[in-house]
Amino acid sequence: MTTSFATATTRAWRALSLPNWTREPLLHFVLLGALLFAVDRFIIGRADDPHTIVIGAEVDAEARQLFKASRGREPDADELAALRRIWLDNEVLYREGLAMQVDKGDTAIRERVIFKALSVVDANVKLPPVDDRLENATLYEKTYTA
């Protein structure tokens, strides 16, 4: 009687349980792999994406500072939006230039990097703020006065 009860219970359980194909090891392998890929995508997706450009508060602060230094007043909302677009365009061009490796083999860029590295080492401080007007003037002076 005990064996028939156990057999009946097993049959009832199988009738209520999932189909036989759900016990396949291949299905378990595929589901586990999909779960691992989903977890990886979730974790890695939160990391900084090199293709994503974020215009943060430091960009706005720098834009306001440069605008105030050149015009003597704070930029309004339209001018700040224009400064952000210009910064974004420049960042896209910079990253595309690095991707195309236009910095390789250019002596002017090499000299500028060496100069900046020496300045940092000599000053023993963090990187100085970049002023494009000074860079262009120095480059012009080196190029056309030599």
Image (cartoon, rainbow, N blue to C red):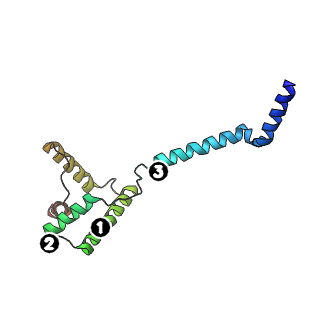
- Residue 42 lies, in percent from the top left, at 49, 48
Amino acid residing under circle 1:
Arg
Camera-side residue of 17 and 122: 17
- Please name which of the two marks, 3 or 1, marks the residue nearer to the observer: 3
Residue under pointer 2: 71
Q: What element does badge 1 sit on? A: helix
Crowding at label 3, few (<14), some or many (≥20) Cα neighbours within 10 Å? few
Q: Is the residue under label 1 in contact with that under label 2 (CB below 8 Å)?
A: no
Query: Callout 2 environment at 10 Å: few (<14), some (14 to 19), or many (20+)?
Result: few
- Counting labels gives 3
Q: Residue at x 16, y 44 (%)?
A: 125
Q: Quadrant of residue 32?
A: top right
Q: Is residue 105 above or below residue 121?
A: below
In this view, which residue lies farthest toward the top? Answer: 2
Residue 45 tag number: 3
Query: Quarter-wise, where is residue 74 in the image?
Result: bottom left
Q: Is residue 4 above or below residue 90?
A: above
The vertical placement of 83 against 112, above or below, is below
Pointer 2 or 3: first along the chain: 3
Locate residue 115, reporting x and y percent: 19, 50
- Residue 144 sits in which quadrant? bottom left
At label 3, the amino acid type is: Gly
The residue that appears at 17% across and 42% down in the rendered structure is 121
Return the residue at label 1: 84
* Residue 119 % position (x, y): 16, 47
- The residue lying at 32 percent from left, 53 percent from top is 105
Who comes first in sequence, dot 2 or dot 1? Answer: 2
Q: Inspect the image, locate mark 2, and give the three-letter code of the amino acid beneath it.
A: Arg
The spot of residue 111 in percent (x, y) is: 23, 52
Whole-angstrom CA distance, mark 2 to mark 1, is 17 Å
